Amino acid sequence: MGFIFIFKPVLKINKGKHTTYKGNVDAELVLHTLIQFPNYDKAIIVSGDGDFRCLIEYLESEKKLLKVLVPNEKYSSLLREFAQFIVPMDLLRKKLERK
């Protein structure tokens, strides 16, 4: 389909009966996005974190931003000016969920 996925190791954290995963991806997302910059036409950023505002702003200024997928309607107010690019993933649930 023409997508490039970059996976990284995560830490598995067991707390009683609950397991969570932590994958400190902030710096790596920015780094890989810029390293791969000449190798893609458009980027889809999957995060509602305001820490990525400068990356999103840069991609938009370079006409390389396609979408910003956020988990739901609650995302950082620092991203509000990019509303035309933002798609809440909960709106995609029916298309993406496994049946």
Image: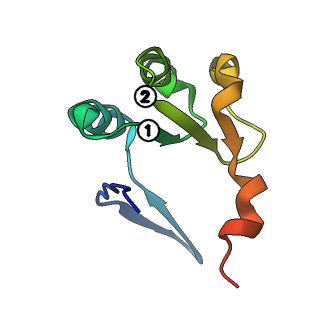
Residue nearer the viewer, 20 or 86: 86
State the SS at label 2. Answer: loop
Left or right, 38 with respect to 73, comes to left
Q: Amino acid at mark 2?
A: Lys
Q: Residue furthest bottom?
A: 99
Crowdedness near tag 2: few (<14), some (14–19) or many (≥20) residues, C-alpha within 10 Å = some
The image shows residue 98, relative to residue 54, as above or below, that is below
Residue nearer the viewer, 38 or 47: 38
- Asked whether the residues under the numbered discs 2 and 1 touch, taking CB atoms below 8 Å apart as contact, a structural biologist would say yes
The image shows residue 76, relative to residue 70, as above or below, that is above
Label located before the other in sequence (2 or 1)? 1
State the SS at label 1. Answer: strand
Residue at which label 1 appears: 43
Rendered residue at 75%/55% (across/down) = 90
The image shows residue 55, relative to residue 96, as above or below, that is above
Left or right, 84 with respect to 25, comes to right
Q: Which label is found at residue 24?
A: none
Q: How is the image coloured?
A: rainbow
Q: Quadrant of the N terminus?
A: bottom left
Rendered residue at 45%/22% (across/down) = 63
Gap in Å between the C-alphas at discs 2 and 1?
6 Å
Q: Amino acid at mark 1?
A: Ala
Residue nearer the viewer, 66 or 80: 66
Using the rendered view, name the quadrant where residue 47 is placed.
Answer: top right
Residue 10 x/y as whole percent: 35, 60
Residue at which label 2 appears: 64
Crowdedness near tag 1: few (<14), some (14–19) or many (≥20) residues, C-alpha within 10 Å = some
Q: Quadrant of the C terminus?
A: bottom right
Residue 28 x/y as whole percent: 30, 39
